[in-house]
Image (tube, grey):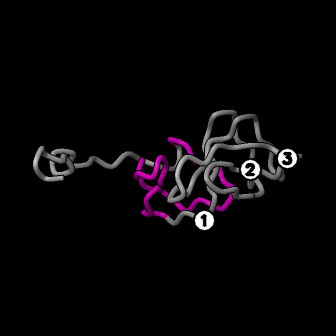
Amino acid sequence: MERRAVLLDLKDNVATCTGEVRKGDLVVAVGDEKVEVTAAENIPIWHKIALKPIKKGEAVIKYGEMIGEADRDIAKGGWVSHENIHSVPRDYASEYILKGDA
C-alpha cells in the first residue's frame, strides 16, 4: 500500500509519515522533490522514516538541520525515533548572525 510522508528540506535524510505505515508499504515523501522508500518496519503516524541508510554516529537531518545523531545503524525505510537517536548539544551562540555581519 502507498503511504505519504513530508520531506521538509532537500538535505533531509528523514521524512515525517502522515499516516500509519506498515512494513513493506511504499512511502512517498513529497516536498521540493519526491523520494520513494519501502518501509523496513512498522512506523506510527507522525514519526520519521529513514530515506537512506543512516550509520551509527551519523547526523540525522530534518528541516535541513541536524536534529540528532544515530545511536545505531538505521536501515533505509527504518523507523527513526528517540529509541535510536540522541540529541547533540549545539553552540547556538556561535551561529548567531549579528547586525553588520550579513
Q: Amino acid at mark 3?
A: Glu
Spatial separation of the CA atoms under disc 1 and disc 2 = 14 Å
Residue at label 1?
A: 53
Residue 73: image tag: none
Q: Which residue in the protein does label 2 denote? A: 41
Q: Is residue 32 left or right of residue 87?
A: right
Question: CB under 8 Å between callouts 1 and 2?
Answer: no
The disc labelled 2 sits on which kind of residue?
Glu
Coordinates of residue 80 in the picture (x, y in percent): 58, 48
Instruction: Find the magenta span and give its range.
Output: 56-82
> Which residue position holds label 3?
2
Q: In which image quadrant can residue 36 be found? A: bottom right
Is 36 on the left-hand or right-hand side of 15?
right
Answer whether labels 3 and 2 touch (C-beta < 8 Å): no
Image coords of residue 3 (percent x, y):
80, 43
Q: Residues within 10 Å of mark 1 (few under 14, many from 20)?
A: some
Q: CA distance from mark 3 to mark 2?
A: 14 Å
Taking the magenta stretch, the answer to whether it contains residue 15 is no
| Residue 96, horizontal then vertical, whole percent | 18, 46
What residue is shown at x 62% (from left), y 42% (from top)? 16
Q: Is residue 46 above or below residue 75?
A: above
Closer to the observer: label 1 or label 2?
A: 1
Q: Residues within 10 Å of mark 3 (few under 14, many from 20)?
A: few
Neighbour class for label 2 at 10 Å: few (<14), some, many (≥20)?
A: some
Which residue in the rendered view is the most extreme toward the left?
100
Within the image, what quadrant is residue 38 found in? Answer: bottom right
